[in-house]
């Protein structure tokens, strides 16, 4: 089933004029094994950690932008990451997050997930039947 979704997605992606980004390439060529081995597939996995890494990298670039020597800048950035990666502190931060989190609304989330899966399957069936309209507008 995954192959069908990927082929449709990549076809439409290219058809509307988008380039094949590294993320699209990974989806097309390398993710099938993970999709088969992870219940629900990779689509159900949170990507908050990716956004956090982008934000952290941006803060470091801004903080060390005035350091002209690339080697010194890289070393300073690496040292800062190391200093901010203390296991005990990370554990305490995670504990605070868990205690501050609201309980999950499983019924609502399950219903939304079911609806999303049904809409995706309907769109795939339309695409494969030639009934889908692809537009870059």
Image (cartoon, rainbow, N blue to C red):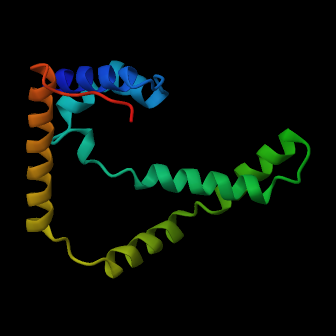
**Residue 137, percent from left and from top:** 39, 36
- Tally of marks: 0
- In this view, 4 is above or below 107: above
Question: In the displayed structure, does residue 90 sit left or right of residue 111?
Answer: right
Q: On the image, which quarter does residue 109 sit in?
A: bottom left
Question: In the displayed structure, does residue 127 sit left or right of residue 25?
Answer: left
- In this view, 112 is above or below 69: below
Question: In the displayed structure, does residue 84 sit left or right of residue 27?
Answer: right
**Residue 107, percent from left and from top:** 8, 67
Q: Nearer the viewer, residue 46 or 85?
A: 46
Please give the name of the residue rendered at 45% of the width and 26% of the height, measured from the top-left corner. 18
- In this view, 56 is above or below 129: below
- In this view, 63 is above or below 2: below
Most extreme residue toward the bottom, as rendered?
100
**Residue 3, percent from left and from top:** 20, 21
Q: Nearer the viewer, residue 3 or 9?
A: 9
Please give the name of the residue rendered at 44% of the width and 53% of the height, measured from the top-left corner. 49
Q: On the image, which quarter does residue 1 sit in?
A: top left
Please give the name of the residue rendered at 13% of the width and 20% of the height, measured from the top-left corner. 128
Residue 134 visible within the image: yes
Most extreme residue toward the right, as rendered?
68
Q: Nearer the viewer, residue 64 or 81?
A: 64
Q: On the image, which quarter does residue 4 sit in?
A: top left
Q: Nearer the viewer, residue 40 or 114?
A: 114
Most extreme residue toward the front, as rendered?
137
Residue 30 visible within the image: no
**Residue 130, percent from left and from top:** 14, 19
Please give the name of the residue rendered at 82% of the width and 52% of the height, measured from the top-left corner. 65
């Amino acid at each position: 089933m995954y192959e069908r979704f990927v082929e449709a997605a990549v076809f439409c992606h290219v058809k509307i004029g988008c380039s094949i980004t590294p993320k699209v390439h990974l989806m097309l060529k390398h993710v099938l094994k993970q999709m088969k081995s992870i219940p629900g597939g990779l689509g159900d996995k949170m990507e908050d950690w990716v956004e956090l890494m982008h934000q952290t990298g941006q803060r470091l670039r801004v903080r060390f932008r005035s350091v002209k020597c690339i080697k010194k800048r890289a070393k300073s950035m690496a040292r800062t990451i190391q200093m901010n990666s203390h296991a005990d502190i990370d554990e305490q931060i995670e504990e605070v997050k868990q205690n501050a989190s609201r309980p999950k609304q499983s019924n609502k989330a399950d219903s939304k997930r079911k609806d999303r899966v049904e809409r995706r399957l309907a769109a795939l069936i339309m695409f494969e039947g030639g009934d889908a309209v692809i537009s870059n507008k």
